[in-house]
Image: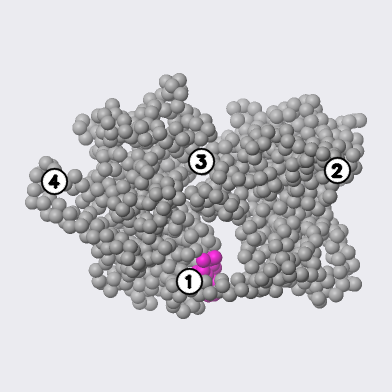
Amino acid sequence: KGGERVRGHILAAMATQSDDEKRNSPASEDEVMEAIDLPHGPKPWPVVGNMPHVGFLGERPFAYNIGEMFAKYGDIFTLKLDMLGGVDDQDKCGGVLPIFIADPAIVQELVLREKEFPKMWTSKINKSISFLGGKGLFTSSTVDREWQTARPLMSKPFNEVKIKQYFDIIVDKSERYVDQLERRVCGGEALISELNDWNSCFTFDTVMEASLGTDLKNLEALGEGRPLDPFLPAFRKAFQLNLKFSQGWEMKHYLQPFKNKKLLEEFESSVAVMFDRMDSLIEQTRNGTIGDRKSVLYSLLFDDSPLTNEKVMLKNVRSHLVTLMVAGHETTAATIGFTMYFLAKNPECQRRAREEARRVMGSKGYLEYKDAGKLTYITACLRETLRIFSAVNLLQRSCAKDTTVTSRTGTKYKIPAGSHMYVVLRGLHTRQEDWGETPLEWNPEHFLDEELIKKRHPHSYYPFGFAMRSCIGQFFAIWEARVCLALMLNKLTLKVPEGYKFKAARGMGPAPFPKDFALVMAHREDQIVSSKGKSSSSDKHASTLAESREAAQKLPADPSSKQQESVKIYFGSNVGACEELAFSIQQYLKTFGLNSVVAQLDDAITNDFSSKTIIVTSTYNGFPPDNAKKFASWLKDGSASSGICWKKAKFALCGVGNSQWHSTFHKFPNQIYKALTEFGAETIVPNCMLDVSKEWDSHFEKWLGKLAGVLTGTGEASLPAPVMTRANRLQVDFAAGDMKVETINEVFHSNLSKFLVRKLDILENRELQYGKDERSTRHIEIALPKEMPYNCGDHLAIRPFSSPELVDEALDLLKLKGDEWLVAGMEENPKKARIKARRLLALLDLTVCPSKAELTQLAESCPCPPEMFKLKQLAENRDEGKTTLEVLKQFRSVQLDLKGFCEFFPLMKVRYYSIASSSKSVQGKNVCKICVGVVDYTTSTGRHHTGASSGMLSGLRAGDSVFGYVPELSSNFRLKDGVPIIMIGPGTGIAPFMGFLEEREVIKAEKEAVLFFGCRSAAQDNIYKKELEKFKSSGALTDLFVAFSRDQKEKIYVQNLILEQKELVWRLLQEDAVVYVCGDASSMAPAVREAFSRVISHFTSEKEAKEYMDTMEESKRYLEDVWG
């Protein structure tokens, strides 16, 4: 009956699945029949099953032993473990065995098919634990109404948005903890034992004050040798004895009656102390002597759940409080302990963490809320610790009916009805495919190195659980741990004691701890001393509140009525990013009554700079953007230095760049700043230099808030940072029946001379890759109109459109059919055009991901409290793979009209492709060729993603057409005749060099031409092999060196071949060879640059090599055409 009841609960949950979830659910009878049975682990022993194999009762966490079995038995298998098996009772479920999983692809299915695989707290060991935990947040099933009621009430205070209100408490407790340790060190060096106790007291005190509003002062008690809060020792004893006595006195206890009688008394006494302590806290909260309305316990007692509109049942409040008091501190304490050990064991990592902490603190010597998020290295250390020693070892799920799951290799496995499934984190987090050949080695670079992050499966890391059963306190735990470690490392050096044998063992609660943990700690003479006085967290909160009120009073009473002088905003942009930012600035300033005009940077030549000026610009391969060339010349030739009173000029500068192009990073913005300040102009606020290869929007928003504060006269830190939209300036509305507005086609053809884009015919589209490689690279030949000439080294700009599938999803959200007539135009242009809804939506980039600010904006407009809460959580812990369209599909209560929808999606930008041909090679025809690497992958959300442009191009055939043009871009990436050339172009980076070689063949170039090409395998992607052989035969190409990165054990790249051919390379450089590099900017281009530097230094010196490289760049002999 128990099994049938539980399966009924799960089937009821599945009935509420969305269509998307049902499509992800492989539950057909045919598929189940075709799937294979699950493999078994080691052969079970009679009676005891696999208990001896996993060491169920041993000191080492048994999940670690299971984790080691995956190497032998595969990434999914069953074991006979009665305590973890089937639903309620194995006999009633036909002997269903528990399933153990380490395959991230199967984990992905559990996430996507969440309603089919809920957590069911129904196994024998679950019931045993429930004796202490009751029906708490952790110890109850997802389908339980009580869990659904309590979850939003308990999670609301711990999302990352709310961390700010607890930050002063976290800092205060961390400082107290470090002070206690410093007292024991006494200015020298000391062995600190019982560190597990110290970490537990710190985390327990912190979470209790934050969530219940009461300071239990366990840190002080431990330091003074006084008894701790009675809950801590009582819980530890009760948990140790729980499995033994949760069912009371049993027959097995008669084997040692006297010993067991004494232990039972200790167990019952500890349980009584635990429950008495919790009852006391509940009564104090009920009577208002502790906590306030923000207290989690207050919320459990008095608030209605936003999900069920019900209050938590009084009998279960104590159960939820156990979860808070145990899981809220014990897991974090374990993580801090393991991280302290690893930092002590790895002095170089400790040094880096200490330097980061000090850099972030600065001379002030303490952390503010805005600082903690900058502790990226310390956070990576914590995440790496959680990978190896996850606070929770098993993530439990169940299924109600026969179904299947698919492994990473594509194998389908049968999952019998009634199964309990366990994701073993030690197995998932140590797979060599995802974590390298030595996955048990602690290495924070796993969470810093972008290449390592991209390489692993997106579902290979879940230390805090996943989906709706993920840990509610994960944000709080990370903030608490990194603040504590940063303050500790500033003042103390950590060392592993001589003879200490590190071992992870079952701890004082469910989480493993380092056994008998102790470290040697030494006082640091060079510590940064805090410049603030001691104050309580309540004092700090009051001070912050007063400052906020004072700042609010400074704002104009009616900003819209306050007339301000006009601000000039200029942008330099090739692809539209800086233009978008310029209009975003204008929109934000408008909310404070500030008038402004936006124009291209070249128009600034006619500006007398008497008005305050804002400049937003990028760099294109080190040169000014096309609409800023005149401005750059104006600054350089001396024209700007006369006729303007620069000493009265005020400007603000926002530079936009990508640090992957390190040699030209912010080159043009820096030139502007240098020139204007040398003329005598002053900056309004410090420059904002954005790095779009990283998170940049919050930096921009803070800068804009400061800028607006100065421009309105309210102070640099007075105005709130804006919530930025995409600022595509698209004005759209439904067409009235009598509106006589030209259609988009009519506007295009009647104003053809104003548009660069033309309709281009496809002549050929073929696949370049071969063998079994699933990747795709297309060779596409396109007919160009006669008025569109090009040169070698030019690009073809393609105007992509969103896919019909994405447009259908957008139409569904907007409740449109697609054939509705709209009137659309740009904000700054009075010209409008009629366009069908489907066609307009195709012009938008429907694959963009939302910024934190946009998610916050959606949350604020969400009328459904549970969805609003989830959106705020998403804003603080963004899934980088989730698009804005997916967010809107998930949170259907957010209703956007057509205009509001368009504000979240920018117009689709053109994509640039290096032209892979020479116009001289085809007599009488204007044909160009491009080489397109097709972007095609599955996102972390399970969505199949194809590149907007590459996906569109890959599907075109001869006779189809595409919109595009040849842009006039600033570039020296041109074939030079009369000198040797060295070309480096792995992958699709070979494209411009195919054009170079075609042209060399036509003009019969005599100087040497060397190509370094790279790909994965000779059997898969050695593209253009036949064409290159033909170029060698004709003499257009003199030497070809191909690096196959995957055809041998050690990976070989183009930079390795450059070093191998150093004599040839050096000889050609001595003959004034020009070097061309095309391809990836993040890894390849820097590695190639380093290789050339090493070649030169081999024949000269390191100093001379640097000077030689600088000279080559200045003389345009080292040229790059690279992308991120």
Residue at disc 4, secondary structure: loop
Which dot marks residue 457? 3
Q: Which residue is mark 2?
A: 755
User: 776 or 1042: which is nearer to us?
Assistant: 776
Q: Is residue 361 magenta?
A: yes
Mark 4 / mark 2, whichever is N-terminal:
4
Mark 1 / mark 4, whichever is N-terminal:
4
Residue at disc 2, secondary structure: loop
Residue at disc 1, secondary structure: helix
* Dot 3 amino acid type: His
- Frontmost of labels 2 and 1 is 1
Report the side of 295 relative to 507 (left or right).
Answer: right
- Frontmost of labels 1 and 4 is 1
Res 7 → quadrant: top left
Alpha carbon distance from label 2 to label 1: 57 Å
- Frontmost of labels 2 and 3 is 2
Segment tinted magenta in the rendering: 358-371
* Dot 2 amino acid type: Phe
Residue at image location 79% in from the left, 31% down from the top = 961
User: 984 or 594: which is nearer to us?
Assistant: 594
Neighbour class for label 1 at 10 Å: few (<14), some, many (≥20)?
Answer: some
Q: Which residue is mark 1?
A: 541
Which dot marks residue 572? none
Res 94 → quadrant: top left
